Image (cartoon, helix red, strand yellow):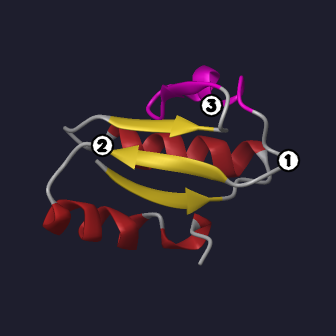
Amino acid sequence: MQEMYVRVKSFQDVRSLSVIASKEDFYIGITDGHRRVNAKSLMGIFTLSMDRPLVLQLDCSEEIGEAFRVKVGRFLID
């Protein structure tokens, strides 16, 4: 399982992240540290606390994970 930290600040960010995740054929979870939901679920993401970084959890190969990292680059936190 690969992990990457992201920050979403608006409805548009949540929608964009969910759309990007929905196009992938592997599981992508997102957690705020207390709850974990499917990142492909727009409503699920809104149940998370967005006042701190979120963690994307990808169930895929490292190569596919790196390609996904590029797609969500604007949300990534170093």
Residues at marks 2 and 3, CA–CA distance in whole angstroms: 16 Å
Q: Indicate yes or no whether the magenta region holds residue 77.
A: no
Sequence-earlier tag: 3 or 1: 3
Number of the front mark, 2 or 3:
3
The correct choice, above or below, for 44 with respect to 27 in the image is above
Q: In the rendered structure, find residue 23 and report the number of the disc placed on it.
A: 2
Q: Residues within 10 Å of mark 2 (few under 14, many from 20)?
A: few
Residue with the most extreme right position = 51
Task: Write the residue at 30% across / 43% down.
Answer: 23
Q: Which residues are magenta?
A: 35-48
Which comes sooner in the sequence, label 2 or label 3?
2
Residue type indicated by callout 2? Lys
Instruction: Measuring from the top left, give residue 32's x and y in whole percent.
Output: 67, 38
User: Residue at position x 65%, y 43% from top?
Assistant: 14
Q: Which residue is mark 3?
A: 45
Frontmost residue, 71 versus 35: 35
Question: Mark on residue 51?
Answer: 1
Q: Residue 2: give x, y in percent of width and height.
A: 32, 55
Disc 3 marks which amino acid? Ile
In the rendered structure, the answer to whether residue 50 lies left or right of residue 35 reads: right
The one nearer the camera, 13 or 45, is 45
Identity of the residue drawn at 32% across and 62% down: 68
- Position of 61 compared to 29: left or right? left
Question: Of tags 3 and 1, which is closer to the observer?
Answer: 1
Q: Secondary structure at mark 3?
A: helix
Q: Position of residue 74 (x, y in %)?
A: 58, 72
- Find out whether the residues at labels 1 and 2 contact each other: C-beta distance under 8 Å: no
